[in-house]
Image: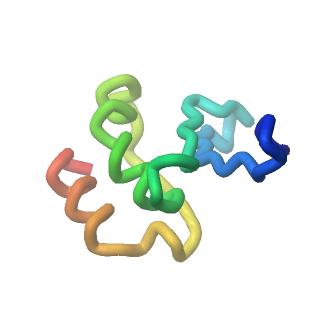
Amino acid sequence: MKDNNGDPVHLLNVFVHDLSLTIETYSVKGEKTNESGSLKEHAAELFEKYPMLTLLTGDAIFNNRPLLTVLQALGK
């Protein structure tokens, strides 16, 4: 998918596998980050909105200290 300027749309999607349901989508464009950085920026609001979330899975890009520090501070 591309935006009005023809640039690719870069999104972070948070979804529940068992329900095949996307619960949140965050734009990565403009934040000068990647998916991991976007999750770091939105983690508090995500867990506030969905406090029942207890397990996150992701690929290797999510394996970094700044994100893990934020998740630990949130008690996740």
| Residue at x 80%, y 35% (from the top left corner) | 4
Residue placed farthest to the front in the image?
5
Which residue occupies the foreground of this view, 67 or 57?
A: 67
Q: In the figure, 45 relative to 15: above or below? A: above
Left or right placement of residue 19 versus residue 6 in this view: left
Left or right placement of residue 56 versus residue 44 in this view: right
Q: How is the image coloured?
A: rainbow
| Residue at x 27%, y 50% (from the top left corner) | 76
Left or right placement of residue 3 versus residue 16 in this view: right
Residue placed farthest to the left in the image?
73
| Residue at x 58%, y 69% (from the top left corner) | 59
Which quarter of the figure is the N terminus placed in?
top right
How many discs mark residues in the rendered view? 0
* Residue 9 on image: x %, y %: 72, 46
Q: In the figure, 60 relative to 54: above or below? A: below
Which residue occupies the foreground of this view, 42 or 73?
A: 42
Q: In the figure, 42 relative to 35: above or below? A: above
| Residue at x 46%, y 60% (from the top left corner) | 33
When asked about the image quadrant of residue 47, the answer is top left
* Residue 49 on image: x %, y %: 37, 23
* Residue 21 on image: x %, y %: 69, 31
When asked about the image quadrant of residue 16, the answer is top right
